[in-house]
Image (cartoon, grey):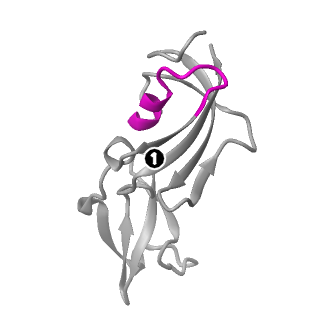
Amino acid sequence: MSKVKANDMVRVHYTGKLTNGEVFDSSLEREPLEVKLGEGSLIPGFEKGLVDMSVNEKKTITIPKEEAYGEIRKELFQSVPKTELPENIEPSVGMGLVARGQDGSERQLRVAEVNEDSIVVDANHPLAGQDLVFDLEVVEIK
């Protein structure tokens, strides 16, 4: 029986959870994730967890934050004057915002703090600083 190895194309069902059991993402209600290993499109711990699995094999892995989205980086917090926000936005902690760069690129931000004249935005990945738990099931190795 073949096993997942580096550079394989795989289809996998997964459920991602925080260590407290809260589910943050799952493929169970949609098509399995199809991805080629080794291309850097998965967090390192997820990819490592798939290696040596067989088709229809299920397992649960815990990925330390260093192999997931890393530590929370303080330099990714920035104060923004409220005058720079669109007029129709009433910022609140946890609200998602999108910043557009001069080159047209977009960056996802989260409001971390609301002050009288400014807000503090956080550009860290929402799962940064967290160990993650994934239930995996390999559906196909191509």
Compared with residue 21, is residue 29 higher up or lower down, i.e. above or below?
Answer: above
Residue 43 shows in the view:
no
Q: Which residue is mark 1?
A: 104
Compared with residue 41, is residue 23 higher up or lower down, i.e. above or below?
Answer: below
Q: Secondary structure at mark 1?
A: loop
**Left of 8 or right of it: where is 76?**
left
Residue 38 falls inside the magenta stretch:
no
Say which residue appears at 68% left-offset and 33% top-offset: 32
**Left of 60 or right of it: where is 29?**
right
Whole-percent x, y for residue 77 in the image = 30, 65
Looking at the image, which residue sits at the far left?
A: 75
Q: Quadrant of the N terminus?
A: top right
**Left of 75 or right of it: where is 14?**
right
Say which residue appears at 58% left-offset and 36% top-offset: 136
Residue 48 falls inside the magenta stretch:
yes
Which of 59 and 7 lies nearest the eye of the viewer?
59
Whole-percent x, y for residue 91 in the image = 50, 78
Q: Residues within 10 Å of mark 1 (few under 14, many from 20)?
A: few
Q: Would you identify the image quadrant in which residue 117 lies?
A: bottom left
Say which residue appears at 50% left-offset and 64% top-offset: 97
Looking at the image, which residue sits at the far right?
A: 29
What segment carries the magenta color?
43-58
Inspect the image, locate mark 1, and give the three-letter code of the amino acid beneath it.
Answer: Gly
Which of 109 and 101 lies nearest the eye of the viewer?
109
Say which residue appears at 62% left-offset and 13% top-offset: 142
Compared with residue 14, is residue 90 higher up or lower down, i.e. above or below?
Answer: below
Residue 111 shows in the view:
yes
Whole-percent x, y for residue 88 in the image = 58, 78
